[in-house]
Amino acid sequence: MELFSIASGSSGNCICVGDDRCHLMIDAGISGKRIEAGMNKMGYTTKDMDGILITHEHSDHVSGLGVVARKYGLPIYATKGTIAAIRRTKSLGTINDGLFHSITAGEPFTIGGITVDPVHISHDAADPVAYFFESGQKRIGVVTDLGYYDDVIMEKMKNLDALLVEANHDIHMLQAGSYPYPLKQRILGERGHLSNESCGQLLSRILHDSLKYILLGHLSRENNYPELAFVTVQQEITLGDNPYRANDFPIEIAARDQVSRLVTV
């Protein structure tokens, strides 16, 4: 299986997962032009995708969906609540109803040879999910936009071969920054985003010998720095109650405006 990020951050998200026979896009929160350029850099085109999986309806995850859907006619998979919210988003334009496929958190389904497992997450959206993918005994997770993690999500994150996980903000930068108080509380709340510290603590609880690659994603432009996220997560892993040190695992940042390396497991 393979994983790469075209864009990951509070300004836009588009991730790709696939195997030898099937390729899937997770979110379309950047322009169709940027999506196509990112695909081309990895040797693909947008029309090579077998479907688009939407985590939730916020603009940084769907702003390019209307254009991509109309141009390529790709099937769109999302929960019932997310589909309803997308249909209410006038800025996306008209999307053919026949492209939508309703899915349910906790009910795995198959696209091509890939089993897709949508899992409910805590975020201030209609019906948000994270996605886990399995093909040929290899597993990849894409987990962002969660205010907190519980036993269910941690169990799903165990035994992964590769993972893209949110490290959204530095708590002190957010608290001292210019965001209005209600927005700060939203981000810090149980339906907000994972901080660098929380991301590191979560990783400390799910690390295992077979985990081959970790991408830190969905970094805030205003309340984080890539270097700070990287160092903080490393410290939490090394100091955490686990038998590992951060250097035991390849960890990189999924950039806001650059395509990541191709992760193959």
Image (cartoon, grey):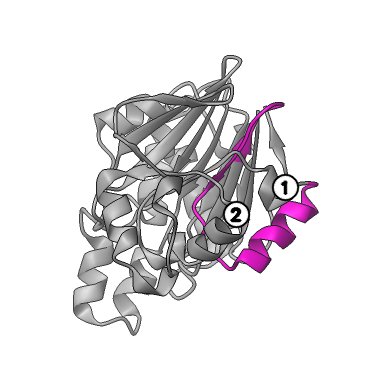
Q: Residue at position x 27%, y 45% from top?
A: 80
Q: Residue at position x 34%, y 24% from top?
A: 155
Q: Residue furthest top?
A: 137
The label shown at residue 261 is: 1
Q: Does the magenta stretch include residue 197?
A: no
Mark 1 element type: loop
Tell me if residue 220 comes above or below residue 150 in the rendering. Answer: below
Q: Which of 187 and 200 is in front in this view?
A: 187
Q: In this view, does 252 lie to the left or right of 154?
A: right
Q: Position of residue 194 (x, y in %)?
A: 35, 53
Q: Is residue 254 visible?
A: yes
Q: Where is residue 96 in the image (x, y as percent from the top left)?
A: 44, 55
Task: Please state the extent of the stretch shown in magenta in the rendering.
Answer: 17-43
Q: Is residue 11 left or right of residue 4?
A: left
Q: Residue at position x 62%, y 54% from top?
A: 72
For the N terminus, the image quarter is top right
Q: Which amino acid does label 2 sit on?
A: Ala
Tell me if residue 196 comes above or below residue 109 in the rendering. Answer: below
Q: Position of residue 144 (x, y in %)?
A: 41, 49
Q: List the residue tagged with mark 2.
A: 254
Mark 2 element type: loop
For the C terminus, the image quarter is top right
Q: Which amino acid does label 1 sit on?
A: Arg
Q: Which of 128 and 219 is in front in this view?
A: 128
